[in-house]
Amino acid sequence: MFHLLPPVSSESSIDADLSAHPVLANATASSPYLQRLCRYRPETLQRINSDGAETTVRNAIECANFCADGHSVDEVKKTLRHCKSDIHLSLASLDLSCTWDWDPVTRTFSEFADKAADTALRAACFKAAESGWIEWSDRDQPVLGLFLLALGKHGAMELNYSSDIDIIAMYDPDIFPSASRSAGDAAVRIIQLTAQILEQQTEHGYVLRVDLRLRPDPRSTPVAVSTHSADLYYESVGQNWKRMAYIKARPCAGDTVAADAFLKELEPFIWRRHLDFWALEDIRAIKNQIHSTGGHKGLENPEFDVKLGRGGIREIEFFAQTQQLIHGGRHPELRNRRTVDALEALAADGHVASETASELAELYGLLRGIEHRVQMLNDDHTHTLSHREEQRERVAHLCGYAELAAFDSDVREMREKVHTHYSALFHSPDQLPGVEGNLVFTGVDIDPGTVETLESLGFSDAKGVIADVQSWHRGKLRATKTQRSRQLLTALEARLFQLMSETGNPDAAFDGFKTFLAGLSGGVQTLSLFTANPVILDDLIAIFSMAPRLARDLASNPNLIESLLDGGFTDDIREDTCGYVGGVAAVQTNHDLSFEDAMNEVRRNFRDAHFRIRFRLLNDAKLLADAGHCFSDLADTCIRALEPHAIKAAEASLGPASGKWVICGLGKLGNRDLTARSDLDLMVIYDPDEGASSAANFFTRATQRLITSLSAQTEEGLLYEADMQLRPSGRAGPVAVRLSAFADYYRNDAWTWEHMALTRLRVIAGDPGLADRVMAEKQAQLSLPRPKDMLIQDAWDMRQRLLKERPPKNALDVKLAKGGMMDVEFLAQTAQLVHPEADWGDRTLETVLPKTVEYGLLSDGELRSLMHTYVMCRGLQAYQRAALDRAVDQTEWPEALKRITAKALNVEDFEALLSLLFQQQEAVWSIFCKQMQPETTEWISPSR
């Protein structure tokens, strides 16, 4: 592919010295960097002309290897920079003239990097010794225990023209000769100075860019790492991509004896004699991540990252390294640092066809040559052939091409060949379709191809997502501490990101999954469940995109996911208990349970049942109408299950019960219309046995135990917040109310709002006979005539006071908003009080409102407005409370939640739903004002 550059045109303007070097002279027309070097180091041109480029290279390397003792840091910096300039100019001459191919070019530059790194380290150590940080008596030997490991292309002796060097700096604290500073502090300061000597930009340029991020956990560890902590890290958190990195590791500076000893200790981590199944799957998953789809799609694009792009250098390196990891533990002859040597060894051992190895080795050299020329343009650390033709023409010219079209065609052909071999590696028929491009979360750099892929999938902060996933792979979460959990995560990632994209709101889905994963105490069991049951993962990602609250609940109780394995999702939601509600109910008759055991047993089954209701509600819009009844039935069952245990707990300290009691629900519980986050409005009523003087004390204690059983936080969590403020006299009254006192209070002392609340009272648990008497007393109280104008005035005043003291939080506070749920409920309750003689049936809102039309209190149109608005408000509240932590306005609703809510309420989209809601609320507020303002007579005098 590479050709000798043609002779320079006579029309070119070239200095006299440069004209003696036609290859470089012609190259400077395409390379501003080489042009600057020729101007900056004319003496080097003269030496190349007189002594030859090879001799000039060797002299520069020897110069870089001078002893740093006696020279200032500034002198070392200057000398190394001059050496680097001479190396670059000489190697460009040898490379572009086709005197050398890529192999000796990369070896030579790597050799220079070794000498420069060692000189810089020695200069930093001299400075440290002079400052008293370390003791260094034998200056002819390196500082004991301090060394640099070269990795990546540097470790493989394959540095390209403008590479950075990947190094890990380590010290052995057992032998490192620290003095006035601790070993760690001294080592860090030495390495910081070493890096500065090499990479600081001065008037003479720089020597090498230094990348120290391949060290263990680079975001939280210092630039110099102790060998002890490194050993511990690789034993506990080492990832397979780290093993790949260490294939190329070698000592390049400092105490090479200590470095060799460390690498020897690390061999079992790098080269495993027995490769377990999960490691193999992890390697396969990393391969699939790098390009999630096969084929040659995108190869025709002339813009190309030679290193990371499809059909590029990384694919050849991965082709070799993965098979080295798999087989190198048992076959030491495969442990080669250089990629082409590894391909040759793999072919010799029969793991790769010899034709494949030979072709990939040739292609590797050609791609490396292109990479050199891309970097020769401006000494930039870039690997990309630009989409701009004039930039590619310069690279093509440096490769000896006269026509860009021929260069582009040859590059495309090379890429196709590379990618064909790469795609066949670990070919898997179940490879995930639909995700185009890279998904790479290994290494320390953010892969630009992965950024592009995630952005195409709809993620707004692709780099942030990559950083999060990289931290997971470094074991930063409890769920990813173990190697197997990280391997499972790797295998799931392509599917995860596809599913997140399909939700329409991948950011919300990722945030939900991130919250879920962060809350897990361990990851293997849950991630294995996702692997074995991909449908569950599909459903959960959809839920995470709309319900951050559910994600947090699942994180704290991951066993809830197992309830999804029980089926039953095609059943009527009211029958979909899968035994969980039955498990709650069984506690009622299990008299052998202690009070604490009863509480925990109810909570365990409640969690699963409550989760299933929420999960199904968020997955199936048709279930909205029954959700309130399901939540209420579950609450009823919990109360009934714990009621006998509360009595038993009171009897344990006070003796047998001296009477009977019932537990009543009010508010949403009384109306059988609970949501996922409703508290329980409760009232306890008892009737003492005749002559029993201690009944009040007993039932007070029993009520306290009941409230504890419902509201206490145990190791299994809590059930509900219980609210007893609706009892007679509220907080000032006893927690358990005697039946006679109940009747007397509502007859003589209750406020209008308390009579309104009474309309929704129903008995949930307790003695059946007393339950009948309580409901009869309720009916009797609500049947008493009261001053109608006073009732309306009171109801109006109370609503106005609530608007002032508890205004709606935002437009979607459907309970408190004008024309919202409270106004509809007030109308229904006031109607019952104003017309006590009417038959209001079971007094639920769904029964009462139609009867207002029957009794001539409302028109058919007004009824439709009230019912339609209430259904919309109730639906919005149900979804909000199932999915979110608090009432938020529409801007904070996840898009997926908006879609399911609109669908459940039979509206085209969420914007249309809000428009209709606000319109209907205006109509309801108008009806409320018309009927409830004191001067109206509509409620008092029905039309018939």
Image (tube, grey):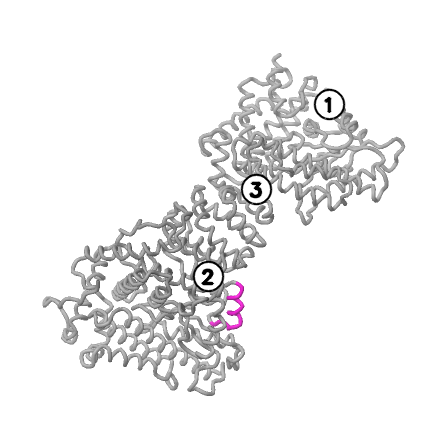
Quote the CA–CA distance across marks 3 and 2. 32 Å
Q: Main secondary structure of the magenta part?
A: helix
**As displayed, is residue 571 above or below residue 284?**
above
How crowded is the residue under tag 3: few (<14 C-alpha within 10 Å), some, or many (20+)? few
Task: Please give the range of residues in magenta.
Answer: 224-236
Q: Earlier in the sequence, mark 1 or mark 2?
A: 2
Quadrant in the picture for the C terminus: top right
- The residue at 60%/38% (across/down) is 676
In this view of the protein, can residue 361 be seen by the observer?
yes
Q: Secondary structure at mark 3?
A: helix
How crowded is the residue under tag 2: few (<14 C-alpha within 10 Å), some, or many (20+)? many
Q: Secondary structure at mark 1?
A: helix
Q: Nearer the viewer, mark 1 or mark 3?
A: 3
- The residue at 84%/44% (across/down) is 653
Q: Nearer the viewer, residue 112 or 361?
A: 361
**As displayed, is residue 682 above or below residue 344?**
above
- The spot of residue 52 in percent (x, y) is 20, 79
Provide the residue designation for mark 3: 565
Provide the residue designation for mark 2: 240
Provide the residue designation for mark 1: 779
**As displayed, is residue 705 above or below residue 117?**
above
Q: Earlier in the sequence, mark 1 or mark 3?
A: 3
Pointer 1 with pointer 3, Cβ within 8 A? no
Q: Amino acid at mark 3?
A: Leu
- The spot of residue 762 in percent (x, y) is 70, 29
Question: In the image as oriented, which residue stretches furthest toward the left?
Answer: 10
